[in-house]
Image (cartoon, rainbow, N blue to C red):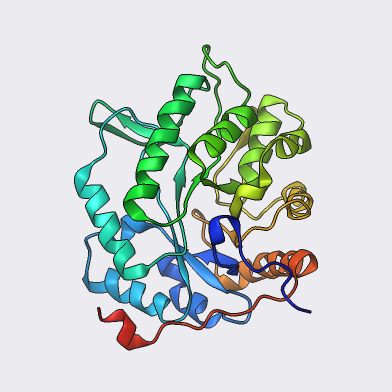
Amino acid sequence: MTQRHQAGFQGTPILGVGLGLRDSLLQETLEATDILDWVEITPENYMGKGGLARQRLEKAMAVYPLVSHGVSLSIGSTDPWDPLYIQQLKELFDIVKPAWFSDHLTFSGINSLYFNDLIPMPRHQASVNHVAERIKYLQDTFQIPVLIENPSFYVNYPDNEMSDEVYLASILEQADCGLLLDVNNVFVNATNHHWDVKAYFDALPLERVVQIHMAGHTEYPEGLVDTHGAPVKEAVWELLDYVLKQCQPSGVMLERDLNIPPFSELRPEIERIKALWEKHYGVIRKTAPRKRKELAG
């Protein structure tokens, strides 16, 4: 069976099935080339660092293509960009040459105060305009495709003027950027806020999906919490199958950030993603890893 699509949105390469690079699973991840095609790094773990961090990065680069998924950029903030952060991120990209870069459609600080959290954006036109201009700056600065990720959130602002799907779609179109679609986040929000989850997906410009996250959540009496610390729930697997019928992403990955088990416990979930990928898109053509001498520069 041959691969059924040759490039993603904005020409992103088709990578296939991935996993977040975690220190505790490093060796097993590097050896799992039978089921993994690429890995996602958190750039904040490597920016401006040498030593062991650089060694881990070089080991991963020698085996897999890398993509970058940030957690601290604060795309929605009204504060000016942090010049040191932008400089170090650009320097990392010069080394890693990621296929694309993503961060969350949230803000993490205001008036130079950092919250260490992903705060949802108010949903109105002024916010759309603000975020779109910030994304355009990132695209101009890094000269690689920039994706925004739909976040989970637990409260609605009183001045919201748009539904979440209209707000997200408006930013994607106005900024002309890609989407990192977190299927679990949509399920968590739909359950907590009583949305029609399939109608949400149907309202999005799914042709802009470049990457998909699959993760688990925790159930409480008050509602669901997006923890990335549990296996993917069956309802979320069903939604992934629904979404894959309607888009042609460049990569789908398992995201596990808390309660990280042995790699052997993650393998069945990765294999399930791979089976769904091949069902919809065919067998993935492997990208040859870079040679060691290419990492020295």
Q: Where is residue 148 in the image (x, y as percent from the top left)?
A: 50, 44
Q: Which residue is drawn at 75% across and 72% down?
A: 282
Residue at the spot 32% in from the left edge and 50% down from the top edge? 141
Residue 293 vs residue 218, the one in the foreground:
293
| Quadrant (top left/top right/bottom left/bottom right) for the C terminus | bottom left
Q: In this view, does 233 lie to the left or right of 129?
A: right
Where residue 289 appears, as percent x and y from the top left, is 46, 82
What residue lies at 53% left-to-right and 71% top-to-bottom? 38
The number of discs equals 0
Determine whether 97 is above or below 244 in the image.
below
Q: Quadrant of the N terminus?
A: bottom right
Q: Say which residue appears at 28% left-offset and 57% top-offset.
A: 90
Asked whether the viewer can see residue 121, the reply is no
Q: Residue 140 or 240: which is nearer the viewer?
A: 140
Residue 266 seen anywhere in this rendered image of the structure: yes
* Residue 135 picture location, percent across and down: 41, 41
